[in-house]
Amino acid sequence: MRARVITITSGKGGVGKTTLTANLGVALAMQGQRVVAIDADVGLRNLDVMLGLENRIVYDLVDVIEGRCRLRQALVHDKRLSEFFLLPAAQTRDKSAVQPDDMVHVCESLREQHDFILIDSPAGIERGFRYAVAPADEILIITNPEVAAVRDADRIIGLVEAEEKGPPRLIVNRLRPGLVRRGEMLNIADVVELLAIDLIGIVPEDKAVLVATNRGQPLAFSDDGSLAGRAFHHIACRLRGEDVPFMTLREPGMLERFFRFVRSGGN
Amino acid sequence: MEFFKRLMSPRRELSSGEVAKERLRLVLAHDRTSISPALLNTLKDEIIAVISRHVAIDVEEVQVTFSQSARETRLVADIPLLTGRRRRKK
């Protein structure tokens, strides 16, 4: 069994790369997969806090590359799951500490023992992006339905196509169905038409994501039926080759909201 | 009254989502080809110069734009020829 190496990237910062990596990792591990999530954002690490593992870090990616520890020692096991590990980024170094070949070697050593290696790419198109993409078999591009994010995603798609990694797949994050219905936000069909790559996920804007992040407990853990949480699990299923239809996302109308309000006893 | 005007008007204002899409369409075409709006204008002027050396064209109506299908971008020049009849009308 050899792991698939999947890099999650976006060009623009703040569109949800790290949140997606954390939740996708958790969702895949909950589905019985053996997963390693690598934080490739050296100097600005955050995947550890998203996962609530910030207090468990002993060694990091740069320690491994520079030979201060063995790879196994740097992996942080998430005890909530049987087979989920974080390889944290170094926080006190910068991106010049990592070469594309280093990432290829690290991933090669992890492949035999795992099913999925997820790489959380830094924002931008410079060396951090380059080394994050170097070992990838597949690339997921995440964007928001918003002009600047879509433009940057298009730049990244051009760069990824030049690397001959196979066609990247798209995730549209933070969609607001109410705004789309009123024509005040790009809809999914617009974004897919503009970027002209295959869609693998739609994640609606959901305040539960922020709440989960506050607690260091990714949304994918809970089964409270939050839309974003379900969306992350669906993406995990599609990555494994399952054919899961896209959710129909719509904002509840006035009447529906009223009845919900009444039923909830005014809360 | 304003409501009826809007309902009846044949050219309604574009929603901000539609504006975003149109702006992106153009920006992406420029980004992908690294042809700036200025270069596009230069191309247009030179195409007009070359063609009108040989045939009469309606210079005012010439359009040089991008067309997109999937991730392929084409440069499209739309050049109206001045036929005998239209020339007489002028």
Image (cartoon, coloured by chain):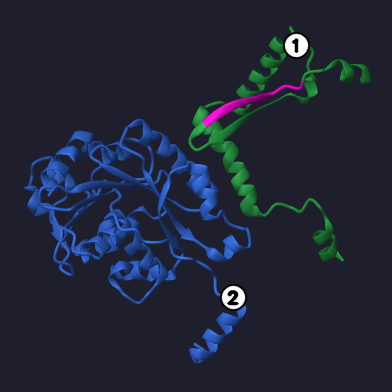
Chain colours: A blue, B green
Is residue B24 covered in magenta?
no
Answer whether residue A48 is visible to the viewer in this image.
Answer: yes
* Magenta residues, dominant SS class: strand
Magenta residues, as a range?
A: B73-80
A65 relative to A120 in the view: left or right: left
The quadrant holding residue B24 is top right
SS state under label 2:
loop
Foreground residue among A93 and A195: A195
Foreground residue among A240 and B15: A240
Which amino acid is tagged 2? Gly
Q: CA distance from mark 2 to mark 1?
A: 59 Å
Farthest top residue in view: B53
x and y, in percent, of residue A208 in the image = 40, 71
The quadrant the C terminus of chain B occupies is top right
Q: How many marks?
A: 2
Q: Residues within 10 Å of mark 2 (few under 14, many from 20)?
A: few
Residue marked by disc 1? B52
